[in-house]
């Protein structure tokens, strides 16, 4: 099954990388919704948070642990938003787990 984020993680599709290790990749969103808009993805395919099991939870924990360093690199460690759209009604368009890291402007709450 083809997956655009698996292709980005595997280097088949280029991306503007912000951070990478064995478990995850962070890269700039193609269609930024804020001055800082980076996607955090696991390198191994997980559809969304709806499919998280024990191993997936460890992967997600690893990704969350890297957020302070990634936000410092981006200069937005003081204020940022993390969003994971899960399922079509929530706005998920790419069916490979990803966390949006957004910063650099005022955000509304509740989200639209
Ligand atoms: P979501 O709608 O939550 O599934 O977010 C998917 C995001 O992925 C959306 O903000 C646009 C981004 N995106 C889709 N295709 C590509 C791509 O090929 N490269 C990059 N950098 N981002 C992409």
Image (cartoon, helix red, strand yellow):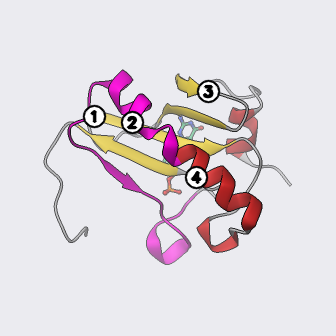
Residue under circle 1?
Answer: 77
34 vs 48: above or below: above
Residue under circle 3?
Answer: 20
- Quadrant containing the N terminus is bottom right
Residue displayed at 65% across by 61% down: 57
Residue under circle 4?
Answer: 61
Q: Earlier in the sequence, mark 3 or mark 1?
A: 3
Viewer-closest of 4 and 101? 101
Q: In front of the other: label 2 or label 3?
A: 2
69 vs 63: above or below: above
Query: Which residue range is magenta in the image?
Result: 64-93
Residue displayed at 38% across by 22% down: 73
Q: Position of residue 10 (x, y in %)?
A: 77, 31
Q: Disc 1, disc 2: CB below 8 Å?
A: yes
Magenta-colored stretch includes residue 26: no
Q: CA distance from mark 1 to mark 4?
A: 18 Å
Secondary structure found at label 1:
loop
- Quadrant containing the C terminus is bottom left
Q: Is residue 63 left or right of residue 5?
A: left
Label 3: few (<14), some (14–19) or many (≥20) C-alpha neighbours in 10 Å: some
């Amino acid at each position: 099954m083809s997956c655009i984020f698996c292709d980005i993680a595997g280097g088949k599709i280029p991306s503007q990388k912000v951070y990478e290790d064995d478990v995850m990749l962070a890269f700039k969103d193609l269609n930024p919704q804020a001055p800082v808009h980076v996607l955090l993805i696991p390198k191994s395919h997980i559809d969304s948070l709806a499919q998280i099991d024990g191993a997936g939870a460890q992967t997600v924990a690893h990704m969350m642990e890297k957020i302070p360093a990634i936000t410092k690199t981006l200069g937005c460690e003081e204020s940022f938003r993390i969003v994971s759209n899960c399922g079509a009604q929530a706005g998920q368009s790419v069916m490979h787990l990803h966390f949006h890291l957004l910063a650099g402007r005022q955000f509304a709450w509740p989200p639209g």
